[in-house]
Amino acid sequence: MKASKITYKPLGMVLGALSGMAAGAAFKQAWKMIGHEGDAPDATDENRTWREVLAAAALQGAIFAVVKAAVDRGGAAATRRLTGTWPG
């Protein structure tokens, strides 16, 4: 295994946890910005419509994917700057 991959493993785990928290916070703000009061619906929330539950899930998934990709890419670029090789 290349040194850059070994170096990136623990960094990637920390970045993954941080990106999950950041994505969760971004989703809550986005949900409020589009005019919904309170928390986003859970899939088993009986008082919410299918449309609202699925829209919330789609928005949450999109935000999570974008944040994760940005953080992973930034972490890989930082690893290359430190080690001189790309960790992938």
Image (cartoon, rainbow, N blue to C red):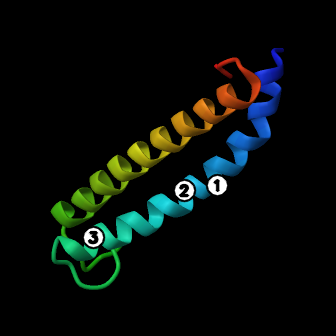
Residue occupying the point 28% across, 55% down? 59
Which residue appears farthest toward the top when viewing the image? 1
> How far separated are the C-alphas under marks 2 and 3?
16 Å
Evaluate if marks 2 and 3 touch, with contact meaning CB atoms under 8 Å apart. no
Please give the label number shown on residue 17: 1
Label 2, on which residue? 20
Please give the label number shown on residue 28: none
Label 3, on which residue? 31
Would you call the spot at circle 2 few (<14 residues within 10 Å), some (14-19), or many (20 or more)? some
Across and down, in percent, residue 21 comes to: 55, 63
Evaluate if marks 2 and 1 touch, with contact meaning CB atoms under 8 Å apart. yes
**Apparent side of residue 58 relative to residue 78 in the rendered image (left or right):** left
Q: What amino acid type is highlighted by mark number 2?
A: Gly
Residue occupying the point 73% across, 31% down? 82
Quarter of the image where the C terminus is located:
top right
Q: Nearer the viewer, residue 82 or 48?
A: 82
Image-quadrant location for residue 41: bottom left
Q: What amino acid type is highlighted by mark number 3?
A: Trp
Q: Nearer the viewer, residue 61 or 5?
A: 5
Q: Could you tell which of marks 2 and 3 lies nearer the N-terminus?
A: 2
Q: Is residue 42 depicted above or below 63 in this figure?
A: below
Q: Is residue 38 depicted above or below 33 in this figure?
A: below
Q: Secondary structure at mark 3?
A: helix
Q: What amino acid type is highlighted by mark number 1?
A: Ala
Q: Secondary structure at mark 1?
A: helix
